[in-house]
Image (cartoon, grey):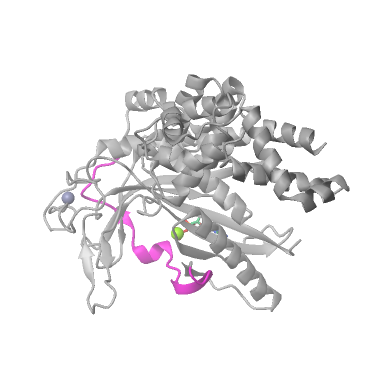
Amino acid sequence: MSAYEAVIGLEVHVHLATASKLFCSCPNSFGDEPNTNVCEVCSGMPGVLPVLNRRAVEYATRMALAVHATVNQRSRFARKNYFYPDMPKDYQISQFELPLCEHGWLDITVNGQTRRIGITRIHMEDDAGKNIHPQGENVSYVDLNRAGTPLIEIVSEPDLRSAEEAVAYLRKLHGMVVSLGISNGNMEEGCFRCDANVSIRPRGEKKLGTRTELKNLNSFRNVQRAIEFEIARQSDLLDDGEEVIQETRLYDAVRNLTAPMRSKEDAQDYRYFPDPDLLPVVITDEELAEWAATQPELPDARTARYISDFQLPEQDAEQLCADPHLAAFFEKAATLCGQPKKVANVMLGMMMREINQKNLDTAALAIAPDAVAELVTIMGNGTISAKIAADVFPELMQGGIMPAALVKERGLMQVSDTGAIDAAVQKVLDANPAEVEAYKGGKKKLISFFVGQVMREMRGKANPALVNEALARLLG
Ligand code: ADP
Ligand code: MG
Ligand code: ZN
């Protein structure tokens, strides 16, 4: 065990999926022609007044309720002043002294150990635009489509103790925001971004060590690797009698290292002050009660329900429930075929592989729950083998065809005709006399060689149980 303990706090920015921006009526959408969703307000013209988007307040409050936090029914927007070309106002509208939400928590489980992670605050703010630096061109462009779009920032207490815990916490938050329907959670589009604050201290020490803030962590995997790298780097420094410098560091995924970006600003550098253009944000008792009463089912509750209603193992239930779209898909398929565990196996196995490989959006899968239900049924009744199911699955993912029809069209139905199987087995035995001799002499492991050969002979369609039975019989 290392002599040091890692201390990690995360700042997570979640892009809210409202129809319009936070303080103007420009569309809040991704991927449009640059600078088409821009008006006087979000481009920072003088003499205009921002008007708060109520839906953003609702979404932020829903997140606060989900993490058992105190909702400040009266909060304030503040100006965070700094200059950057993608932010024409020269200040970001954020919340500082009086955030919307404080003192929340969520539980994470890593290696069977459950720990409660404190959430310091959640506040609303607007996003900046984007600077674009095209490769090979000696210019930079600014796209203001994202300027003024709504974000919440979720700040954790420095309660996390390892990279695994940080990722578990992030996955949990991610499952919550997509289940609440307040964000699409797309990490590649930057809709769910995280900065990790990392320090280390000698085990047993109560005082916090000097932290660095890591940026550019755009996948769960990169969060994990960046934090691991940073813990190792800081440990080496302390081992060598050197000091950790408080700074912002950028993660380089290609080289898997962090490198200094700038020295860390303090809050005072931003000259925060209450935004004089905006009224305090007031949430009425009625609004709060209504939002609380209409919270969607969250991953933890859903996981518990799947364990009790569908008898799923906890890990399967958790994985499915982390994504509300997959969970809804599962429920339909499991109800249709009545074999929940088998449905979970197909979804967490073949289906996840396809989703990850092709980077598919689980909200818009072409395959229907009926298809997975039918696949599970025809695997269960012996119409097709697991091998054939895996072979045709990528095609099923494209939608438009049901599994029974597909395997029929391709002639892929499992062969359970013992005559045909016996013939294939005999052919394999005749073709491999040396192996037969060795098997009879005691090399029983050769059985898998024979099974493989028979399967090949029958193009993967032989019923495996019958092949084993025939081999046992004919090998004597
Ligand atoms: P800032 O806004 O300047 O980044 P905050 O005080 O809001 O600073 O802290 C940001 C995050 O850093 C929080 O998640 C907090 O838990 C975490 N943090 C603060 N001190 C440490 C530390 N010594 N080690 C690790 N994380 C820390
Ligand atoms: Mg910070
Ligand atoms: Zn606008």
Q: Quadrant of the C terminus?
A: top right
The answer to whether residue 61 is above or below residue 437 is above
Which residue: 48% across, 26% down?
373
Queried whether the magenta region covers residue 144, the answer comes back as no
Queried whether the magenta region covers residue 268, the answer comes back as yes
Depth check: 254 or 342 in front? Answer: 342
Depth check: 407 or 104 in front? Answer: 407
Which residue: 36% across, 43% down?
184
| The residue stretch that appears in magenta | 254-281
Q: In screen coordinates, is 415 left or right of 187?
A: right
Which residue sits furthest right? Answer: 441
The answer to whether residue 317 is above or below residue 135 is above
Q: Position of residue 224 (x, y in %)?
A: 56, 57
Q: In screen coordinates, is 227 left or right of 206?
A: left
Q: Position of residue 76 (x, y in %)?
A: 32, 45
Which residue: 43% across, 29% down?
371
Q: Position of residue 153 (x, y in %)?
A: 40, 49
Which residue: 65% across, 28% down?
418
Q: In screen coordinates, is 335 left or right of 178?
A: right
